């Protein structure tokens, strides 16, 4: 039973995106050929071990890749609704830096990985929330302030917090500030990069709940990045499993958990400790994630794969559709010849 | 230490530039007596009246002679030798004192640290030039060694402060704590656990002291307040100013010692920066990201 | 008082800072006093001899004469008595004693005359180099991969440790002698009346350019470098990525986030470098025959004028310490983290 919001509207279409880092030992291919479509008004969970490139992918969509990181290639089409409700899709990588800058925060906002460090230690909270508003609107001071308080209220922050400095707030409060700041301009898309990982479990639960409610209320699209599969189970509509810079599987969240197609997904799921699920032995994935400087030949997962076949070390499987709403990059599913990706090729 | 040098050489162009310049200059200073021989034989380059005054550059005197009838090239080389030697000696003395004080202070902490830190701060705020000059003035026959000692007197508090700061942060590191818990003695911890990790900072502190000592030495010599019995590059500058080489059209007599000094300072600074770059990869252009 | 301090930790902080301020000044003066007195010199006799030579007369009285002058200069009694007397006069009467230079004028008058010139030059060159260094350093950090930034950085590195007097030599040589663009001696032309008239002011400005330029060149390089590395280490900070994710303009991110966070250590650095800037400037003034404290220093050292030298050092130590005290006192006002740390 899953509830998937299929509005039939694309928000983001990523094609063959590559984000590499220049290093002294050659390029580190953090994101190396990602194909993905994000629909409007869904929560998309991006999962994978640390170092698999999911954070880089999130930053890549936002376009905040800094040297030594750079875009090696690909497209990130971002679709905006015009007033006459026609869709305009533009490639963020082809737009000028200035154009992308103007879109940030207004069209796509960001909730950072460590809210502990994202707030400048020497400026008050209100200043840091308001500067984003003033940059993208020509609102009056009163209007901006009113909006700020409204958003703070949504995440359960007291007005007094506005006059405080970051170091005076707890981790949970800082995270709420980051959420409140991200929704001030009601963007189409919010990318949340491990927003609760640094918090303790109780606070994490509360904040996840709040985030979920706010998203539903404001009808935002949310890309939620975390390695924590339990959080995905709770938050996501659909999810993508990333490994070694590419997506291994994309599927609705219920299918991912109940009927994973990719051996790597299986491994990830079996490594979740289940509460009240008896004394089941937890299964990890043997071996270590490969270095982005040097990926294995063929399927990048094959050295660790329990179901490895001869072809796996020779040919790299592509992410292809194997059922309605289901995509997997694995030679085990080569016999499937489902129609080409619904949105591919345009 | 050799490995550190090799790594710095590999990662930093600045380090390579500085090292090459410095090695060339030090090499020149070392072989200077060999260069003297065909020009002045076994005499001291400083002895006046050896040749005709103000000879233009020629085969026998590649840079000509000065107002006291001395060969200029040999005097520059002698000046370079002494200046580098004084800098090196003062650097060694002040680094030794500074490191000992800094280490002791930072490692012991508490009351001893407070007292040593206060004394260090007192010495740092005293402007050193007037006192250096005053000492130099009443000591007519100043030797190179005393000169270095006096310069070191005012240079050590800076390296003491730097080492102390490093020791303070290092003291909190896990491996030092571990060594303490496992019952190693203070000296053992300092030499086996902390020293190896402080080596680059020691080298930087040393370079800093050398530069500081040379800056002070050249300063008081160049403006004519230093001793006149030791030939240094500073003294050469002072002579050049005194002779009024501008009006004679012999700019190079002033420019050469100034340029050599600028090169020395630049080279040492480049080496320092190169090491810093190697130690703090964020300063590098191309970083090794995860 | 202690009760009050426990109640308001900030008072405790201020008290500690003031205590360290006075202690350091007192200690530095004590060290300097004994250092000077331990140098074997005979200033009184030298001075009397120089007077004799100058006015071609013989001063009679011999020892009695010398002793009476010794008394005037506070050089009678044991070293310890001299020390106590000197410190007493300085601390309670602000009396620095007489000077050999233009005897019997007191040292304080001599310094008061020279001080405005030094302070003026120092203020101009420090503020130019600090502000410019911060801006250029931040820009060099922001575009750190561009060749222009690399060139600026390399030139700054090369210049940062070169003493200002070497730069001054170049300036004197080329701008002063070769091209004769600017004056290299003194602080103004004698033909103009001293006062607030345009000619005089223009003359003062023209005379100050070369000495100021010598100081600015070197310290500018140092400020560029330190700001650059501060901002670069800030560039890795998450708050800059966040500011960029907010879609703020590069300029705003640089000034409001990167520079704002780099400015605190730079303000502290400013106070800390005051000392070396001041002693560097004394030499520059000596070279340019600028009528500031550097001139006084040159003359005082030449005749081993204890009192004048002590006066100079007191002035320098007090101003350096006051600058760093000011930073210490202002820091809790500008940095909220320190404020909270003190309260805790």
Image (cartoon, coloured by chain):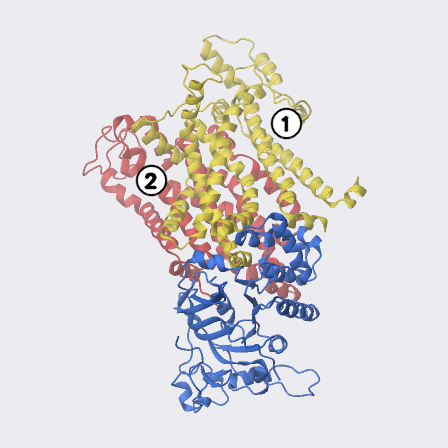
Residue A343: image quadrant is bottom left
Question: Disc 2 vs disc 1: which is toward the camera?
Answer: 2
Q: Residues within 10 Å of mark 2 (few under 14, many from 20)?
A: some
Chain letter for mark 2: B
Q: Colour of chain C?
A: yellow
Question: Residue B255: x, y in percent?
Answer: 31, 36
Q: Which residue is mark 2?
A: B259
Compared to A53, does B67 lie above or below? Answer: above
Q: Residue at left 26%, top 27%?
A: B248
Name the outermost residue toward the right: C3
Q: Which sits in the foreground, A262 or B4?
A: A262
Q: Colour of chain B?
A: red
Name the outermost residue toward the left: B59
Q: Circle 1 sits in a helix, a strand or a loop, which is it? A: helix
Can the viewer see residue B143?
no
Residue A26: image quadrant is bottom left
Q: Which sits in the foreground, C328 or C48?
A: C328
Can the viewer see residue C216?
yes
Question: Residue B180: x, y in percent?
Answer: 64, 63
Label 2 to label 1: alpha-carbon separation: 46 Å
Q: Which residue is mark 1?
A: C79
Q: Residue at left 58%, top 32%?
A: C319
Is residue A179 toward the left or the right of residue C218 in the image? right
Chain coloured blue here: A
Q: Which sits in the foreground, A299 or B121?
A: A299
Chain letter for mark 1: C
Name the outermost residue toward the front: A84
Residue B146 got which mark? none
Q: Residue at left 38%, top 85%?
A: A314
């Amino acid at each position: 039973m899953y509830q998937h919001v299929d509005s039939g509207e694309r928000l983001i279409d990523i094609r063959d995106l590559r984000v590499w880092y220049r290093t002294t030992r050659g390029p580190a291919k953090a994101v190396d050929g990602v194909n993905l479509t994000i629909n409007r008004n869904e929560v998309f969970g991006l999962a994978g071990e640390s170092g698999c490139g999911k954070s880089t992918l999130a930053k890549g969509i936002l376009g905040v890749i800094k040297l030594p990181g750079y875009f090696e290639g690909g497209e990130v089409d971002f679709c905006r609704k015009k007033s006459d409700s026609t869709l305009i899709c533009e490639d963020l990588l082809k737009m000028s830096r200035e154009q992308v800058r103007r879109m940030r925060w207004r069209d796509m906002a960001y909730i950072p990985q460590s809210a502990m460090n994202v707030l400048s230690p020497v400026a008050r909270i209100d200043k840091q929330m308001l500067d984003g508003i003033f940059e993208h609107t020509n609102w009056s001071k009163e209007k901006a302030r009113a909006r700020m308080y409204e958003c703070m209220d949504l995440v359960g922050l007291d007005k007094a917090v506005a006059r405080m400095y970051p170091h005076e707030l707890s981790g949970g409060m800082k995270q709420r500030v980051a959420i409140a700041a991200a929704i001030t301009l009601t963007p189409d898309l919010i990318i949340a990069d491990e927003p609760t990982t640094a918090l303790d479990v109780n606070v994490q639960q509360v904040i996840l709940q709040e985030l979920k409610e706010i998203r539903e209320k404001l009808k935002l699209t949310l890309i939620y990045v975390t390695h924590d599969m339990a959080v995905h189970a709770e938050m996501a509509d659909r999810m993508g499993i990333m490994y070694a810079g590419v997506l291994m599987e994309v599927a609705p969240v219920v299918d991912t958990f109940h009927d994973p197609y990719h051996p790597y997904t299986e491994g990830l799921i079996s490594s979740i400790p289940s509460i009240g699920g008896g004394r089941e032995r937890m299964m990890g994935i043997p071996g270590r994630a490969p270095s982005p400087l040097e990926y294995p030949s063929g399927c990048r997962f094959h050295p660790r794969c329990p179901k490895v076949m001869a072809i796996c070390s020779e040919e790299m499987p592509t992410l292809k559709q194997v059922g309605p709403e289901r995509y997997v990059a694995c030679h085990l599913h080569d016999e499937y010849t489902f129609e080409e990706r619904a949105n591919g090729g345009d | 230490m050799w490995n550190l040098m090799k790594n710095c050489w590999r990662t930093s162009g600045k380090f390579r530039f500085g090292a090459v310049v410095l090695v060339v200059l030090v090499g020149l200073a070392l072989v200077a007596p060999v260069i003297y021989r065909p020009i002045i034989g076994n005499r001291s380059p400083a002895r006046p009246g050896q040749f005709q005054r103000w000879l233009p550059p020629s085969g026998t005197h590649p840079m000509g002679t000065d107002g006291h009838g001395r060969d200029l090239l040999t005097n520059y080389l002698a000046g370079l030798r002494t200046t580098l030697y004084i800098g090196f000696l003062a650097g060694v003395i002040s680094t030794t004192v500074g490191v000992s004080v800094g280490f002791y202070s930072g490692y012991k902490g508490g009351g001893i640290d407070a007292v040593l830190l206060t004394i260090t701060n007192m010495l740092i705020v005293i402007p050193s030039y007037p006192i250096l000059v005053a000492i130099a003035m009443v000591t007519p026959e100043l030797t190179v060694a005393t000169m270095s000692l006096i310069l070191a007197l005012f240079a050590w508090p800076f390296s003491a402060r730097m080492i102390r700061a490093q020791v303070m942060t290092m003291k909190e590191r896990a491996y030092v704590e571990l060594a303490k818990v496992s019952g190693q003695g203070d000296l053992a911890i300092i030499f086996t656990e902390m020293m190896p990790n402080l080596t680059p900072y020691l080298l930087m502190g040393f370079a800093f002291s050398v530069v500081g000592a040379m800056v002070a030495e050249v300063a008081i010599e160049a403006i004519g307040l230093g001793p006149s019995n030791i030939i240094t590059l500073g003294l050469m500058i002072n002579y050049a100013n005194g002779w009024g080489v501008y009006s004679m059209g012999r700019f190079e007599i002033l420019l050469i010692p100034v340029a050599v000094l600028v090169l020395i300072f630049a080279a040492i600074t480049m080496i320092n920066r190169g090491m810093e770059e190697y130690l703090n990869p964020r300063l590098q252009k191309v970083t090794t990201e995860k | 008082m202690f009760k009050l301090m426990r109640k308001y930790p900030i008072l405790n902080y201020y008290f500690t800072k003031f205590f360290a301020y006075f202690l350091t000044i007192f200690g530095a003066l004590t060290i300097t006093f004994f250092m000077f007195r331990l140098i074997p010199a005979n200033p009184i006799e030298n001075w009397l001899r120089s007077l004799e030579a100058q006015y071609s007369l013989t001063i009679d009285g011999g020892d009695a004469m010398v002793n009476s002058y010794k008394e005037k200069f506070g050089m009678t009694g044991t070293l310890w008595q001299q020390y106590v007397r000197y410190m007493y006069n300085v601390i309670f009467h602000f009396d620095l004693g007489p000077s050999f230079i233009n005897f019997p004028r007191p040292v304080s008058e001599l310094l008061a005359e020279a001080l405005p010139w030094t302070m003026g030059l120092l203020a101009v060159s420090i503020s130019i180099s600090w502000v410019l260094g911060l801006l250029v350093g931040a820009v060099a950090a922001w575009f750190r991969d561009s060749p222009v930034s690399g060139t600026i950085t390399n030139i700054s590195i090369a210049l940062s440790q070169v003493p200002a007097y070497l730069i001054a030599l170049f300036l004197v040589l080329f701008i002063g002698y070769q091209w004769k663009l600017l004056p290299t001696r003194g602080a103004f032309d004698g033909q103009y009346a001293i006062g607030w008239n345009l000619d005089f002011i223009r003359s003062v400005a023209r005379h100050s350019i070369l000495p100021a330029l010598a100081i600015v060149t070197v310290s500018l390089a140092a400020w560029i470098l330190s700001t650059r590395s501060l901002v670069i280490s800030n560039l890795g900070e998450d708050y800059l990525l966040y500011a960029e994710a907010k879609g703020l303009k590069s300029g705003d991110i640089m000034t409001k986030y990167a520079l704002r966070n780099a400015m605190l250590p730079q303000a502290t650095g400013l106070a800390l470098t005051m000392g070396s800037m001041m002693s560097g400037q004394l030499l520059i003034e000596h070279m340019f025959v600028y009528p500031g404290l550097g001139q006084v220093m040159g003359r005082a050292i030449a005749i081993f004028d204890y009192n004048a030298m002590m006066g100079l050092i007191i002035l320098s130590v007090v101003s350096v310490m006051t600058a760093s005290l000011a930073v210490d006192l202002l820091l809790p006002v500008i940095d909220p983290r320190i404020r909270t740390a003190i309260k805790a």
